[in-house]
Image: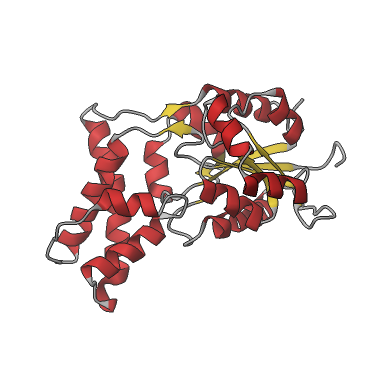
Amino acid sequence: MTKQSHTLILIDHDGTLCQTSSTAYDSLQYALQHALRITKITPKIIDLDSILTQLTGTTEKRLIQELISFYQVAPSKQSLFESSFYKGRAIWYQNMKSHNEFVFDTYYPDMELLIEKTIAKPNYHLGLVTGNPLRVMEERLAPHISKYFTHDGHLFGSFGEEAISRAELINSAVNKAQAIIPGFIPSRDTNGFLSNVFYIGDSQHDFIAGLSAKVKTIYIPSRSLQHSKLIRNEEYVKLLDEVLKGEMIVTNDCASSTTMNFIGLT
């Protein structure tokens, strides 16, 4: 890449940019009750925690599909159920803030440092790729973080109401960047991967989504060095690293020299 080329860094939110506050689960519970109330559907006992675990690394739109199936929501009410769920989550955060009870997610120091390095370079751009809906992220993100992901007064990236899969969100974010960032042109290397787009995620699903979307992928399975080394030595990771040399790294530290060199921030 030349000095004039533009680079896009896409960052997952929960588990990657931050350690998620436990209150996020409360917001989901509230959103579900709000959607059921608005659509006049009888509540049933549901193991929401188990469903969320199964859907790790997907999107809230995918969660809505599961809930619609579980509650047997009629086709005529499905759109209202979905929009009411998203609105309910946003309302929960708004209510928490109005009562001074909102607890922000805890942002990881290595990610904050990476962001600082990124914004210091005018040809580098940040975007969010998250399973959370846009209106929820507008409420959740701390002001000192959200300003770095804001373009023309709006959060930039792809959000959980836009697609079912994380790979779709990554591709959508790239297309959006091409449309609104002057000079950003996705460039492919000999492996067919975008050489100037990076995606950072913390789950195995994020990792596979990044590679499926053919962008350079940074996988943070844990902030523990020992755990990350264990993941790096798993057979499937070793094989992918061998086949896709230069397209991926597995790390516990996004502020490390290895990560910075991979992205080109040194």
Q: Residue at x 43, y 50 (%)?
A: 56
Residue 83 to residue 99: above or below: below
Quadrant position of the C terminus in the picture: top right
Residue 110 to residue 251: above or below: above
Q: Residue at x 32, y 64 (%)?
A: 66
Quadrant position of the N terminus in the picture: top right
Left or right of 103 in this view: 208 = right
Left or right of 31 in this view: 139 = right
Q: Residue at x 29, y 39 (%)?
A: 93
In the rendered image, residue 120, in percent from the top left (x then y), is placed at 69, 26
State which quadrant residue 226 falls in.
top right
Left or right of 96 in this view: 233 = right
Residue 189 to residue 70: above or below: above
Residue 78 to residue 21: above or below: below
In the rendered image, residue 264, in percent from the top left (x then y), is placed at 77, 33
Please indicate, yes or no, whether residue 106 appears anywhere in the rendered image: yes
